[in-house]
Amino acid sequence: MLTTAATAFSGAVISGRWWSELPHSGLPFVLAFISLSATALLIAEYCNAKRWQKPLCFAWVAMAAATAGLFVATSVGQSYLKWQQLGGEIQQDVIIEGRVVGYQRFADYDRLILTGNSVDKYVWDKQWAVQLHYYRPQAAFTNGQRIRTAARIKPARAIANPAGFDMQRWYVSQRIVKTGYVRGHRIALIEPDTSTRNRLKSRLTSLQLPGEKWLLALLFGERQEFTKSDWQLLQQTGTAHLFAISGLHLMIVAGAILIFFRGWIAASAWLSFTLPKSLYLTAFIFVLATCGFYAYLADWQTAVLRAYCALLIIAVLHLFNLRLSRLTLVLLTLSVSILLDPMAVYGAALYLSVGAVAIIIWLHWWWETSSRGGNWIRGVVLLQLTLSVLMAPLVGALLGQVSLISPLINLLIVPVMSLLVIPLCLLGLLMLIVLPVDHLITSWVLYGCGKVLEWLMQLLDQVASFVGDYAAFPVFTSTWLMASLIALLLILLPPFKGRLLLLIVMLLACSGGYLPVTRKTEDWQVHVFDVGQGNATLISRNSKAILFDTGASFASGFNFVETVIHPFLHIRGLQLERVFISHFDNDHAGGLDFIRKTYPELAIVTPEDNCHAGGKWQWQGLNMQAFWPLPDASEDWSDNDGSCVIRVTDGRYSVLLPGDIEQKAEQILLSLPKVSQALTSNIILAPHHGSKTSSSTAFIEQVKPQFVVFSQGWLNRWGFPHGHVAERYRNAGSQAMLVSESGYLRFDITSDGIRTYAYRASQQSRWYHKTFVKQ
């Protein structure tokens, strides 16, 4: 019964992760439950047979738990929307006071996440967070400090594309309802962090130890100092879990304490000393208290909270001599974790940790039932290999990458971390608590831990460099394929009680949309990606593609080619054959470095070489012609007016890609008879994102577009598209499409005409992608 309830509840809450629409309230679910319950009671009364009582009872429990789960999913979703939309969809200059719970440094800005906020003296609910960027920072902060800042904020809204990392879902998982940036340098510390955690962390950092960032991760869950290359190394080697405080770390703490108590019991028996009956209770209380303190030092992060819940449940069951099946224990832990943090269902950590625990419990059951025992080394090796193999589909589905060397690396490094490094780190932490900070033994222990960690990471780096690109491979296929692999694994496993229920929960954990890829050879598509204030347009035909502009890149290393376009090419099975760059502004050419690194043989056409008037290319039956800039122009054009203007046509339908040209260049184009006549196109990407300095009336009347696309950022500071420009296109009969509203756009061009697809409005997007009114 408990298994049924836990499965129904957790499955219902998890299903909210991939709802296309969010119900306005949970009341309909409650009313439906009441109606179904009444129907079940009538059936039971009418049938009056004992054989129906148990199935009806199970059905009623499942309905009640599912109703509760749907109610929770709806309620937290609506609560998120309420705070996200607080103040309307506008940018606001406000004074924020809040406590720093996330702080990360990048090349030219710091990222702060604040909770417990007061915005213009209006006190927010403590659970909701604000993310701020602090550009060219002149002050540094740490988690736990309370700050006051003048900031410009808006509802948390991310780009929306059918492939790549889903930032909007991450916002939901982190409870971030507003994003913005610090105005100037108007930011100040108003309350230092005087907690025990911060004092211990300060004592550690004052020692200036080698491998300090790795020690901070293991002892305090602080990973803000990790660089992009550090994260890449951990992902390539599949060792990121070792530096995220979780069940492994709490298990080591609990194991050390229980070994101490067992040693005490053995010594007492040898000395014929009678121990009090309450010793076992004392041991469990001490385990829970110590693990709770470690969890506090880790700031009660999601993985730690989940592991502590599992430990608490096991302790209660053991103390009261209660028995639960292994499956029920996993599902109960999952349900309690969801109750404590319902938003965790939108992240990946919940499924990875629960999945790992489920695999360990299953392997333990299989080891016992298959009468294998004695050789614990064999068991440890089998456990690590089984974990690596069975976790691979789930890791690939949720994180988009699977490490090929992870099984071997973890087989070697997990014992070293578990038996040597983590225990020594915890011993050093204990000494840091009870001894003076400059005590020689404390320094020696922590220094040794830091050196070992540095050596291990250098070794991992050498292994990853030696293996190269084969260390890990990205998983871009639809997550339904990953779900199918998980289903296959569960089906192939030996039969066990509750296998179907476990299968249902794991399938619900995998979300993703289906992207149709089959097209007729005469069809072609124009894909306009949502890259914020910038442009990246892809044209595809016959499983081939050409890219026009790349979107921006940032000092943090983020670029849209790597995070959006590259995954999209793989998930659609497209081969990139050429790249055109209109001009070298960052919002159009920021991804060039990644293009050159990833596709070293790819032809790149820019205004500095062949992308000028007279240039012609034929590709997959499409004709491409450059109209601008003039190859022998004597005038020194601005970067915008020097953009390469290209028209793509199949002889019937055409697309005009004018870059960032302004009215000066437009007038020259209109003055060239042959060019002017050829400008007419069905689709135009609005010049300069809809700036008032572009899209003159004469230019629009000559192009006569059926569709105009404004590739601009939501609530961008320039106000693109300008109202007068939008009105000009509207007067010309053009249908305007704003990427900031629609997300990714696709134009399907066939012999029957042009069809449009907007990602935010489609069934493939989720409710958190659609919760915005028009600007």
Image (cartoon, helix red, strand yellow):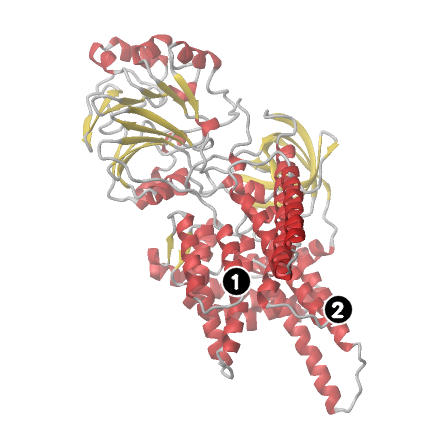
- What residue sits 34% from the left and 8% below the top? 698
Q: Is residue 509 left or right of residue 188?
A: left
Q: How far across and how far down the image is residue 272, in percent?
A: 77, 91
- What residue sits 55% from the left and 51% below the top? 225
The residue that disc 1 covers is 356
Foreground residue among 504 and 608: 504
Crowding at dot 2, Cα within 10 Å, few <14 / some 14-19 / many 20+, comes out as some
Could you tell me which secondary element the residue under label 1 belongs to? helix
Q: Is residue 707 left or right of residue 367?
A: left
The residue that disc 2 covers is 285
Amino acid type, mark 1: Ala
Residue 293, image quadrant: bottom right
Q: How far across and how far down the image is residue 51, in percent?
A: 61, 61
Q: How far across and how far down the image is residue 141, in percent?
A: 64, 44
Amino acid type, mark 2: Ile
Foreground residue among 371 and 298: 371
Crowding at dot 1, Cα within 10 Å, few <14 / some 14-19 / many 20+, comes out as some
